[in-house]
Image: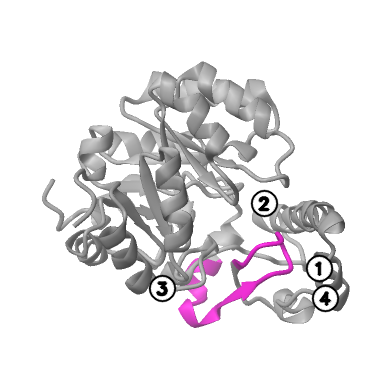
Amino acid sequence: MSQRKTLQQILGIRFPVLVAPMFLISNASMVIEALNAGATAAIPALNFRTDAALREAVNEIRQKSQGPFGFNLIVNKSNPALKRQLETLCDLRVDYIITSLGSPAEVIKRCKPLGIKVFCDVVNLTYAQKVEALGADALIAVGSEAGGHCGPVSNNILLPQLVNHCHIPVIAAGGIGSSAQIAKWMEMGAAGVSVGTVFIASEEAPVSMAYKTALIDFSAKDIVLSSKLSGSPLTVINTEYVQKIGTKASLLEKLMKRNKWLKKYLKMIIFARGMKKITRSAFSATYQTVWVAGPSIDYVQSVRPLREIMHELVSDFQS
């Protein structure tokens, strides 16, 4: 077995559960409840429109809870705010940063001297070994079961590969919605788990009740993979609108992606347009309904306080 530490040992927490950073959804209230329940949580830096708002959230979390928390950074060119966000998070000395969709080299370089841990989203062994060599503190194995941006293969395949061939802790992400699943992944060598979708149906999540109710009304068979919304594979609920627009990239998008010069600009345009649709759907009534979620919606039966959802998740886990 490759990794030596569990998520509890890495961060000094009671339970090996990380409430995943979810675009638009994660907020200070959710982090506070997760920390007070003995777990950890992260927020996408992109959830804050201004630097002041990000700093305010960090201050609120520190005032109302104790425990480690982190932020997610999109580290490719689709995120023009990356440099400023990294600067702020280093200035605030957050506990850890989760990197996604790009090279974590600069993040690791900046964070290491400050004692800020860096966890990297990975979807295959080759990339995992690259970020390990760069100095990552842990890997987050993003399987095909993950809600939002997901990997191409199941964690039943990916996680054992990473555990057996890498030497740093591996956190399992994707499709997790029960204490039995946490136990399963830990037995397979995971240091902990990253859980997202089931927490969208928490009282603390800021999204519309229609979105939360959709998690109850739809099931795993209604989850589809779309490449139209962010430039990367994204799992969404197969609403009537999603069926109408389709899930595959258009011919023009495919042709433009083959052009190296156009690719980065196209990706930024696709990301911006897709996020606008997702934002409208998350917070208001619209016929253009695009709700991001993963197959673990099968575990959502009602809208409850986050603390209650967490308690059920770790009910059979011995810390």
Q: Label 1 vs label 3: CA separation?
A: 28 Å
Span of residues in magenta: 214-234
Residue appearing at x 30%, y 34% in the figure: 36
The tag on residue 250 is 4
The tag on residue 258 is 1
Q: How dense is the environment of label 2, judged by Cα within 10 Å: few (below 14), some, or many (20 and up)?
A: some
Q: What residue type is labelled 4?
A: Ser
Task: Measuring from the top left, give residue 294's x and y in whole percent.
Answer: 49, 67
Residue lying furthest left: 318
Give above or below for 318 relative to 221. Answer: above
Mark 4 vs 1, N-terminal side: 4
The nearer-to-camera label among 1 and 3 is 1
Task: Measuring from the top left, give residue 21's x and y in whole percent.
Answer: 49, 46
Q: What residue type is labelled 3?
A: Ser
The nearer-to-camera label among 1 and 2 is 1
Q: What residue type is labelled 2?
A: Phe
Task: Measuring from the top left, give residue 176's x and y in whole percent.
Answer: 35, 64
Mark 1 vs 3, N-terminal side: 3
